Image (cartoon, rainbow, N blue to C red):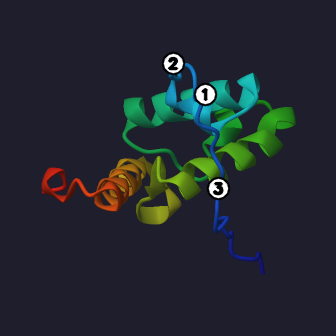
Amino acid sequence: MPRKRRLPDVVSIKIPVYQPPDDVFDVVFESEEAKNMAEEIIEYIKKNGRMGWDEYKELFPPEKHYLYFRVIKRLEALGFISRGAYHTYILSKKFCDRMEHLSKLWLFKIGKVEEIW
């Protein structure tokens, strides 16, 4: 029996200090190959509405399957995508909600409570 896939508890992202990033995937992924793969996955889901659990086989060659699982796991852990019905992947806005919560915590910390509501 296959074991249940686990998502990491913590995913670290690097936020550039001096220059704002051009793309959100510049912050999330370090390699250009992973960024391109994430773009392809997101575009595929946008075009088709969802992505089945085995549709990666027709999108990527077999030598890239190991990278696919790393990318999809990170996308799901950060909240860019989530699981839909029948083990499909759908787009999610959970990442936006997490970043919004983080910004509200910072506003509360510096005493700008009136800007939160």
What residue sits 35% from the left and 60% below the top? Answer: 109
Position of 30 with respect to 9 (left or right) is: right
Q: Indicate the position of residue 111 as horizontal and vertical percent values.
A: 26, 58
Instruction: List the residue tagged with mark 2.
Output: 22
- Please, what secondary structure does the residue beneath circle 3 have? loop
What residue sits 41% from the left and 63% below the top? Answer: 85
Instruction: List the residue tagged with mark 1.
Output: 26
Q: Check whether the beta carbons of the residues at disc 2 and disc 1 lie within 8 A of each other.
A: yes
Q: 75 or 5, which lies in front? A: 75
Gap in angstroms between the C-alphas marked 3 and 1: 14 Å
Can you tell which quarter of the image residue 1 is in? bottom right
The dot on residue 16 is none
Gap in angstroms between the C-alphas marked 2 and 3: 20 Å
Instruction: List the residue tagged with mark 3.
Output: 11
Q: Which amino acid lies under the numbered mark 1 shown in the image of this protein?
A: Asp
Dot 2 crowding, Cα within 10 Å, few <14, some 14–19, many 20+: few
Position of 76 with respect to 102 (left or right) is: right
